[in-house]
């Protein structure tokens, strides 16, 4: 299922957030490795500094020395579960002690004979030796971190190198205990040669389940170059499968990296559906806002005028109307200008409505203060019936109804003559 427009959102917003999240985790891994290195080196150095450890140079050590070094090594291997130890004399030939079973040539009683170093290991002694201070090396083929610590026996005037092999899985378990990675995530040691240092090698997470050697080769090539923070690598040219390597070089001892699949930078089906729902809600709210913006402006105007009306009534309701009427008439335009200024852009966009509601509010104020003796402009407005705009259509005239003729009236007799009254005598006073 395709969703048009998601590619742009993924490229500009989602992918940078994924990269930032991985870089933050790699920063935590780098800091954790520095802590892991310091803790491990401290434990190994304490073991090498014990007098009983130097007794490994002796062919026949005292029972107390044997017990002490055995107990110390046991405690050390409890702290570092995958630890393997090999003590090689400075001549690069004699192995005086080793926990690798393959190094044992023969064992008779309490005496153990070991193979020559060149037969036991394919790494030259000079590459792992340490004469003055401890060193850290990486054996990518075995997936081991090698701590090389110088060791001396003052009584026998012998010296050598205590090689401590720590599997990279121990560091992965350390990260799990810190909550930095999950239990199903693990690191792979990647180095350009069988033996390397932290300048060109490191620990990479997120390796695919298949084709790890091809991925490791691509990582080595990327790290041998400019060491960019984000590098795209191709695992299979035929399939065109692309992976992205994100590198962090903040550690003092090792590089850290994370391999991301191409699918890590695109939305999943559920994320796309959720984004569509959110987009629909945003559009709905935007349209709703546009439709209600007009009503919102009208409500603001009414609320402001209501506040103005209440203030005027509180100020003048106890004063004589004859005095108030003259004062209010002089304040009308000033009050309108103040309200218009206080409303700002709302007044400019709705000036007609503001004038209409202000006039009505003013009329109500006058009516209330006058006790009903003043008629508002609305009450005085004449009632006008609009004329129809339709043209007059002539109608057919109706014939008048016939009128019945009157019957002949009877003749009226002439009235009798009336005698004239004599002059009345005047009344006596």
Image: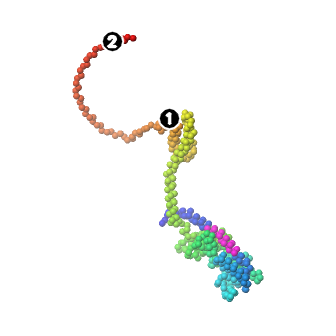
Q: Position of residue 22 (x, y in %)?
A: 60, 67
In this orientation, which residue lies closer to the viewer: 77 or 317?
317
In this orientation, which residue lies closer to the viewer: 62 or 326?
62
Tell me the residue at 57%/73% (across/down): 184
- Visible residue check, residue 46: yes
Is residue 35 one of those drawn in magenta? yes
Q: What residue occupies the far bottom of the structure in this picture?
A: 108
Q: Main secondary structure of the magenta part?
A: helix
* Secondary structure of the residue carrying numbered label 2: loop
Tell me the residue at 58%/66% (across/down): 18
Q: Earlier in the sequence, mark 1 or mark 2?
A: 1
Tell me the residue at 65%/82% (across/down): 100
Q: Position of residue 40 (x, y in %)?
A: 68, 74
With respect to residue 67, does 228 lie above or below? above
Q: Which one is in front in this view, the residue at disc 1 or the one at disc 2?
A: 2
In the rendered image, the quadrant that contains the C terminus is: top left
Task: Tell me which colouring the rendered structure shows.
Answer: rainbow
The quadrant in which residue 74 appears is: bottom right
With respect to residue 164, does 250 lie above or below? above
Q: What residue occupies the far front of the structure in this picture?
A: 429
| Magenta span | 25-43
Residue bearing mark 1 = 373
User: In 3D space, how far apart are the residues under numbered discs 1 and 2 (Cα atoms)?
Assistant: 66 Å
Tell me the residue at 50%/41% (across/down): 360
Residue bearing mark 2 = 423
Is residue 112 one of those drawn in magenta? no
- Left or right of residue 166: residue 356: left
* Crowding near the residue tagged with mark 1, few <14, some 14–19, many ≥20 C-alpha atoms within 10 Å: few
């Amino acid at each position: 299922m395709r969703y048009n427009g998601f590619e742009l959102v993924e490229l500009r917003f989602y992918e940078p957030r994924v990269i930032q999240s991985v870089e933050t985790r790699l920063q935590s891994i780098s800091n954790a490795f520095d802590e892991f290195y310091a803790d491990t080196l401290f434990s190994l150095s304490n073991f090498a500094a014990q007098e009983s450890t130097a007794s490994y140079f002796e062919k026949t050590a005292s029972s107390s020395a044997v017990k002490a070094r055995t107990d110390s090594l046991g405690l050390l291997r409890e702290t570092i579960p995958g630890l393997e130890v090999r003590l090689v004399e400075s001549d690069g030939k004699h192995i005086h002690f080793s926990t690798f079973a393959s190094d044992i040539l023969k064992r008779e009683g309490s005496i153990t004979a070991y193979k020559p170093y060149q037969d036991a290991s394919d790494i030259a002694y000079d590459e792992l030796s340490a004469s003055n201070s401890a060193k850290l090396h990486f054996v990518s083929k075995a997936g081991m971190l090698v701590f090389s610590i110088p060791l001396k026996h003052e009584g026998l005037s012998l010296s050598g190198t205590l090689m401590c092999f720590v599997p990279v899985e121990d560091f992965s378990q350390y990260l799990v205990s810190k909550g930095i990675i999950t239990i199903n995530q693990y690191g792979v040691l990647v180095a350009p040669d069988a033996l390397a240092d932290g300048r060109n090698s490191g620990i990479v997470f997120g390796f695919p389940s298949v084709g790890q050697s091809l991925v490791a080769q691509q990582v080595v090539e990327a790290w041998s170059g400019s060491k960019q923070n984000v590098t795209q690598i191709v695992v299979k040219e035929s399939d065109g499968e692309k992976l992205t390597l994100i590198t962090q070089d903040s550690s003092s001892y090792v590089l850290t990296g994370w391999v991301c699949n191409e699918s890590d930078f695109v939305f999943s089906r559920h994320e796309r559906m959720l984004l569509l729902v959110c987009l629909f809600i945003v559009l709905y709210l935007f349209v709703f806002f546009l439709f209600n913006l007009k009503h919102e402006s009208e409500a603001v105007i009414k609320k402001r005028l209501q506040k103005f009306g209440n203030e005027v009534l509180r100020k003048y309701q106890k004063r004589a109307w004859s005095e108030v009427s003259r004062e209010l008439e002089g304040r009308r335009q000033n009050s309108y200008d103040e309200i218009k200024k206080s409303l700002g852009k709302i007044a400019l966009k709705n000036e007609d409505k503001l004038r209409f509601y202000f006039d009505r509010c003013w009329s109500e104020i006058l009516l209330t203060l006058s006790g009903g003796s003043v008629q508002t402009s609305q009450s005085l407005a004449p009632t006008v019936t609009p004329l129809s705009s339709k043209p007059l259509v002539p109608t057919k005239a109706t014939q008048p109804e016939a009128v019945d003729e009157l019957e002949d009236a009877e003749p009226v007799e002439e009235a009798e003559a009336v005698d004239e009254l004599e002059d009345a005598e005047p009344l006596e006073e």
